[in-house]
Image: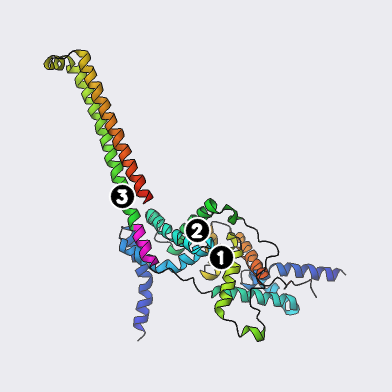
Amino acid sequence: MDKDKHNDNNHQKIRASLALAAVSALEPAAQSQVEAHLESCEPCRKEFSALRGLASELRVLPPPVLAFGLAQRTSARVRAELAARSERRRHNLVLLMVTVFAWIDTLIILAIARMFGNDIARLLHVSDSQLTFGFVVYWLVAVAATVALTGHVGRVHRQRRLV
Amino acid sequence: MIAPFFTAVQEAPLMAENALIRLRRGDLEALTELIEEHQTRLYRFLLRLVREPATAEDLFQQTWIKVMEKIRNYDPNRDFTPWLLTVARNLALDHLRRYRPESLDEPLSSGDSMAELLPTTGEDQGAALLAGERSELLVHALHQLPVLYREVLTLRFEEDLKLEEIAVLLSIPLSTVKSRLRRGLESMRKLLAPDLQVGSHG
């Protein structure tokens, strides 16, 4: 009775490792144990053989048919993508330079206004408040130009991405 | 007579290495060489993961774009193919997560069987069946499996990678690779022949 139970347990254990045994993925000792069991167990031998056959068939499955010109299309897409990224980087660099220039320009104008504001106002025959107004308008135009340029570059990027 | 053969064998990996080095330097001609060299394996792997040719082709192209992004991080002392397949796998899994999240943990639908579709291997019928038909049915059965089993089966049997290499590629323990391999084979076996349930010993 105990012997039968032991044999059945052993059978179930071996059966759970048949798939790995069929592809020689077990440790040598376990592999030998399975092989010894197969000598005396016809159902396991059949299952082992079927699993081994399945593995062999998977090894020789024909590769899928490649779409015509896949390598060339891929190469062209990669080149296009790299070119687009390079252009985006150049755009961003230009934008950064414009922004930095605008800020430097603003700070210089502000410094000039503070140091020589009165002289300039006298030279141009305008009052201090008119001169301040002029500087503020100049600054707003610079900000508006930067924002417009940023928007334009963003639109160009979006359009290219959609294409 | 034999010398040209040995020269060709010795030069083959050298050429691939050169293509990689040139690619790292930004030579796009080398890219075309590498794509042509790896296209069958890469496309097959992606097709097994996503199962749709159009999606596999799109991911194939995205993989090479990613390769160009990451090529400077690639260690040329390592084998290129597993690295390439890892890049492709990450993109494929991202795609599945985004568009077909259910496919990542899809269970095998109980009762579904390929048995009626598959040719039997009996003597009278087996000879009449074309090997191509059998292959199609095997691929169809393979595509019924969850992606985690599919990828291990295709890497082991179609790409002929060692279990240790698969573990590195998938970033999982070797025991998990073995477990998925076992379950994958058993599931396929059940799909192909559900009636072949073996009873207890004796």
A117 w.r.t. B42: above or below: above
A18 w.r.t. A163: above or below: below
Residue occupied by mark 2: B89
Could you tell me if residue A97 is visible in this image?
A: yes
Q: Position of residue A24 (x, y in %)?
A: 61, 72
Between circles 3 and 1, the one closer to the viewer is 3
Taking the spot 34% from the left edge, 42% from the top edge, the residue there is A155
Q: Quadrant of the N terminus of chain B?
A: bottom left
Whether the magenta-drawn stretch holds residue B36 is answered as no
Label 2 vs 1, first from the N-terminus:
2
Dot 2: chain letter: B
Residue A47 sits in quarter: bottom right
Q: Secondary structure at mark 3?
A: helix
- In whole angstroms, how far apart are the C-alphas of marks 3 and 1? 41 Å
Residue occupied by mark 1: B163
Q: Amino acid at mark 2?
A: Arg
Taking the spot 31% from the left edge, 53% from the top edge, the residue there is A83
Left or right of B88? Residue B190 is: right
Q: Position of residue B54 (x, y in %)?
A: 47, 62
Within 10 Å of disc 2 (Cα), the crowding (few <14, some 14-19, many 20+) is: many
Residue occupied by mark 3: A86
Q: Position of residue A75 (x, y in %)?
A: 35, 62
- Residue B199: image tag: none
Tell me the magenta residue range: A69-78
Q: Position of residue B194 (x, y in %)?
A: 70, 70
